[in-house]
């Protein structure tokens, strides 16, 4: 091979580098993530039982959804999840302020606070179902101790969703705690000292000096919590299976139920598209934040 | 430091603080303490109604032995399935995303920001919008109800987060290293292998721990893409056994401990990397 063609080869492997490095990831991601999104959107305009051929029904699935009580209940519960899960960043922040001390053994204590985050939701769901169990649960025990009749939380239409959200708050608080504790170690001590000289005490110091510096942690904690709360599925499947009487349904569970148990694929796809559209708003916000620093 | 370090305050505060911290910790971990205690409780305690008191005897070997006995429960099978799904998925998604992250960080080609955004966004979408098409595809191509299929899907899905993560890490590396290797005539593949990959080691450890917990803890995809014991991972297995064991809470508890243990162990052993990973993947200005 002469020098010239060797050089051309070298040039080519440089020019094509982005392509061949990206190719495996792009192929897999397109097949299993990007392409299916399009298929689901397309399917949401069809009626399909999962076996035969799909028939075009236009907007019928969406129109039916707007009159489906279960769908409206799911939507309402998703709202409830969204709002109440915001307690996780709040609890996480409070705990991080409480634990941000350098004392011997503190590292171990902090990591004990972290680790509920890595436990899978099936186990968490089982633990909390048991905790709430009106016959043998710890909560029932506490109720009896003060002379009250135990409430079957997960079997109560009005309480089931709250019971599940409390279970969800537990690992999510641990996650936010990790973010905030890491954020607190990055606090500029110069600013804290300057604030002290200016006479800023505890609360005003926190509001005007600490909280602004924790902004990056807050953005991540809030967006990840929002997205996680809209995605909630596992705990509902484990703890109530949507019951009692569909009172703890959310969109993610409703979709699964329609598609897997009622074979209404088009209808299920329409629910997933609605959920997708809701989440796109938050994903866009998150993306905007990340890409802000890019040029 | 904020709040003010205790060392700068009254010496009486410190013991008081420690006691409060421990009390809060105990309350926070109460659910876990309960499950650990129950997992060593003999079944006779459960039938006798002793759910929360001191176990009448130490039945650790008995309960865990029962859970792991292949003749009595498929838990061991589930555990092996989970391992066979998780480890390859973590390995291959790290492999392909370190390549993709490298391409997105080092080359300035048109559309690279759009591709980067696509990987981030894809990682956050609701699973349900993928469910029907992926499930249909799995049935059509014989991937449904196989360990390979589930591992393949996780590899593909985790590529989104992993590419985002590694691209951010590589962007911070000094580009001059790549340039000087190029001047010396190294091919791009060689630069990736001999210059970039060695520098990625700490990031790969962090990412590996995170992906391990994500994939190990998955429940939704196991539920939708698997139906028999031969491919069922431990999360789905545990939820299925709940019905079989009914009120044998000591066995459910022991099974739960077994299902949670790998991620918990990985977390405690590689804690520094785990937290660094969460921070790198998230809090970044």
Image: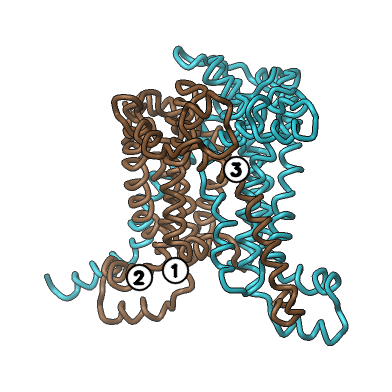
Instruction: Choose between B158 and A82: the one closer to the eye.
Output: A82
| Rendered position, A6 above or below A47 | below
**Residue at image mark 3:** B31
The reply to whether residue A295 is visible in this rendering is no
Judge if badges 1 and 3 mark residues of a common chain: yes
Q: What colour scheme was applied to this rendering of the protein?
A: by chain
Give above or below for A102 relative to A194: above
In the rendered structure, the answer to whether residue B182 lies left or right of residue A26 reads left
Chain for numbered disc 3: B
Give residue A149's position: percent from left, percent from top.
78, 25
Foreground residue among A111 and A278? A111
Mark 3 closeness class: few <14, some 14–19, many ≥20 residues within 10 Å: some
Chain ID for label 2? B
Q: Do circles 2 and 3 both sit on a common chain?
A: yes
What mark, if any, has residue B196 been given in the picture?
2
Q: Colour of chain A?
A: cyan
In this rendering, the label closer to the viewer, 1 or 3: 3
């Amino acid at each position: 091979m002469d020098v010239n063609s060797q050089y051309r080869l070298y040039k080519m492997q440089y020019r094509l580098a982005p392509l061949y490095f990206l190719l495996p990831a792009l192929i897999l991601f397109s097949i299993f993530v990007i392409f299916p999104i399009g298929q689901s959107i397309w399917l949401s305009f069809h009626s399909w039982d999962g076996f035969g051929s799909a028939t075009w029904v236009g907007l019928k699935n969406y129109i039916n959804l707007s009159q489906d009580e279960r769908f409206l209940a799911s939507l309402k519960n998703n709202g409830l999840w969204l709002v109440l899960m915001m307690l996780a960043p709040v609890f996480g922040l409070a705990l991080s302020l409480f634990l941000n001390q350098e004392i011997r053994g503190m590292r171990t204590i902090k990591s004990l606070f972290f680790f509920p985050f890595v436990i899978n939701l099936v186990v968490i769901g089982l633990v909390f179902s048991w905790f709430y169990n009106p016959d043998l649960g710890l909560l029932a025990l506490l109720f009896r101790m003060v002379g009250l009749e135990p409430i079957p939380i997960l079997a109560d239409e009005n309480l089931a969703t709250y019971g599940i959200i409390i279970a969800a708050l537990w690992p999510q608080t641990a996650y936010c705690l990790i973010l905030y504790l890491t954020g607190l170690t990055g606090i500029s001590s110069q600013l804290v000292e300057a604030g002290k000289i200016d006479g800023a005490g505890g609360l005003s110091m926190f509001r005007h000096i600490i909280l602004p510096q924790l902004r990056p942690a807050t953005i991540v904690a809030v967006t990840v919590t929002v997205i996680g709360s809209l995605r909630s599925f596992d705990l509902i499947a484990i703890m109530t299976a949507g019951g009692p009487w569909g009172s703890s349904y959310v969109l993610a569970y409703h979709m699964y139920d329609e598609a897997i148990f009622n074979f209404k694929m088009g209808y299920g796809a329409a629910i997933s598209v609605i959920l997708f559209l809701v989440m796109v708003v938050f994903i866009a916000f998150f993306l905007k934040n990340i890409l802000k620093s890019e040029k | 430091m904020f709040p003010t370090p205790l060392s700068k305050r009254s010496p009486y505060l410190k013991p008081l603080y420690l006691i409060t911290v421990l009390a809060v910790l105990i309350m926070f971990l109460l659910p876990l303490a309960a499950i650990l205690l129950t997992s060593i409780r003999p079944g006779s305690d459960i039938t006798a109604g002793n759910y929360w008191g001191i176990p009448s005897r130490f039945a650790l070997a008995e309960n865990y032995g029962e859970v792991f006995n292949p003749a009595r429960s498929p838990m061991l099978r589930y555990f092996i399935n989970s391992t066979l799904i998780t480890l390859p998925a973590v390995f291959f998604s790290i492999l392909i995303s370190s390549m993709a992250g490298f391409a997105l960080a080092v080359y300035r080609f048109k559309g690279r920001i759009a591709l980067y955004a696509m990987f981030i966004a894809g990682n956050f979408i609701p699973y349900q919008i993928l469910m029907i098409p992926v499930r249909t595809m799995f049935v059509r191509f014989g991937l449904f109800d196989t360990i390979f299929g589930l591992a393949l899907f996780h590899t593909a899905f985790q590529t989104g987060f992993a590419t985002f993560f590694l691209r951010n890490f590589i962007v911070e590396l000094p580009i001059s290293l790549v340039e000087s290797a190029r001047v010396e005539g190294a091919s791009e593949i060689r630069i990736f292998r001999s210059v970039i990959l060695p520098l990625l080691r700490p990031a790969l450890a962090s990412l590996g721990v995170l992906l391990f917990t994500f994939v190990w803890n998955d429940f939704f995809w196991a539920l939708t893409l698997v139906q028999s014991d031969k491919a069922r991972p431990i999360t789905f297995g545990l939820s299925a056994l709940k019905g079989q064991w009914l009120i044998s809470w000591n066995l459910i508890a022991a099974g739960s401990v077994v299902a949670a243990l790998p991620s918990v162990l990985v977390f405690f052993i590689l804690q520094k990397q785990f937290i660094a990973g969460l921070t790198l993947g998230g809090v970044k200005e």
